[in-house]
Amino acid sequence: MYKTINDFDLNGKIVLLRADLNVPVMDGHVTDTTRIDRLKPTIALLRDKGAKTLILSHFGRPKGAADPAFSLAFLTPVLARQWDVPVAFADDCIGESAQQAAENLENGGFALLENVRFHPGEETNDPAFARELAAPGALYINDAFSAAHRAHASTEGLAHILPAAAGLLMEAELKALGDALESPRRPLMAIVGGAKISTKLDVLNNLVKKVDYLCLGGGMANTFLYAQNVEIGRSLCEKDMASQARTIMETAEQAGCRIILPVDRVVVDEIRENAPYEIAERDDMPANREAIDIGPATLAMLDDILDTCKTVLWNGPMGVFEVKPFDKGTNELAQAVARRTKAGTLTSVAGGGDTVSALENAGVAGDFSYISTAGGAFLEWLEGKTLPGVAALDPRNKKAA
């Protein structure tokens, strides 16, 4: 069991806060502040409790060397605006720069340290580098669930050197995900979409042992249909993965999990905005066309099943949601989940990859019970893997520094 930020007296203490500020940027401007905004409750608590906070984060892939293109310096005014607190900047995350930044802080103050990936010891989880990171601090708070699948110095190593705790965002992520998969209200449906099953084999193999319904969409649904000798035409499909798909179906049957595949599909000659389309029943797919969305009969079937469910896990779109009007299947299914969530009959948790974009496109991102900030970490959690950054917070796993 891990400790949380509320378990410590923070007044006057120098806190090392691991955040995930690896945000999308275009032309020097942050295009999505979600990860920054989700950290605000932790920032407010640290301020109110009088902590002196040094913020650690990575940004991009600078390959273990200082690179101005990956500097975090541009973020300080964005953080100050979104968090409503002044944020200083230090041009290194270790050594004299970090120490001086700590000494300059007043109670309730914040300083952002330079990109931890400017040092090769970060990604190799070098104990000596972790000790340098830890040097100014009295307490380590990990609030970066989205980086918790990495065993790096700032996500895992620090927890073995300093007293460690989960931040409010980390705590919320772990509770939501635990409630959804480890101790859910049942029946539990997992909705999994995306292009390929090869990238989600471990996810699917784990989910069929834990959920009551597994709804598949996107290109991966075509692979499962192909494995059942259903015509898929020119649709995106991994034909070489058919045997793995059949194995997953066998595992699901043994575990009592029902796999739900489209019973009708939206088919086109070419993928483009407002392309002419038809609805093809499961066994009437034209060999010269491609399926790019689930059809109305599939949506009606899923709507009926959702009426029986208590929990939904969502990862990935049902079709080519980026091209209108072929976002209809994803949109309507997401709206059906959102309606039940708002009515209090369903707990809904989503995350990973294109999922947030798809739910925002559907206009329901604010209506799910919980949307994870994580991509890779969310998928590895769905795979049933132990996340190093989470495991290290458990005092029982503490190693000698």
Image (spheres, rainbow, N blue to C red):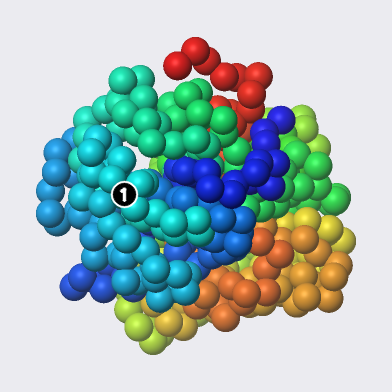
Residue 233, visible in the rendered structure? no
Q: Please identify the quadrant where the C terminus is shown.
A: top left
Please count the marks in the image.
1
Q: Would you place residue 387 above or below residue 89 in this image?
A: above
Q: Position of residue 380 (x, y in %)?
A: 52, 38
Visible residue check, residue 367: yes
In this picture, residue 219 sits left or right of residue 371 = left
> Callout 1 environment at 10 Å: few (<14), some (14 to 19), or many (20+)?
many
Residue depicted at 40% across the width and 31% down the height: 134
Rendering coords of residue 157 (x, y %) = 43, 27
> At which x and y percent is residue 50?
56, 55
Residue holding disc 1: 101
Q: Nearer the viewer, residue 304 or 92?
A: 92
Three-letter amino acid code at the position of disc 1: Ala
**Circle 1 SS class:** helix
Asked whether, in this view, residue 124 is left or right of residue 207, the answer is left
| Residue drawn at (47%, 24%) of the image | 161
Q: Where's the N terminus, which quadrant?
A: top right
Residue 90: percent from the left, percent from the top? 26, 52
In depth, the one of 58 and 316 nearer the eye is: 58
Name above or below for residue 154 compared with residue 29: above
Residue at the location (85% across, 70% down)?
A: 344
Specify whether 35 is left or right of 383. left
Q: Examine the rendered structure and indicate whether residue 252 appears above or below residue 346.
A: above
As drawn, which residue projects farthest toward the top? Answer: 400
Residue sitting at 35 percent across and 71 percent down? Answer: 78
In depth, the one of 318 and 152 nearer the eye is: 152
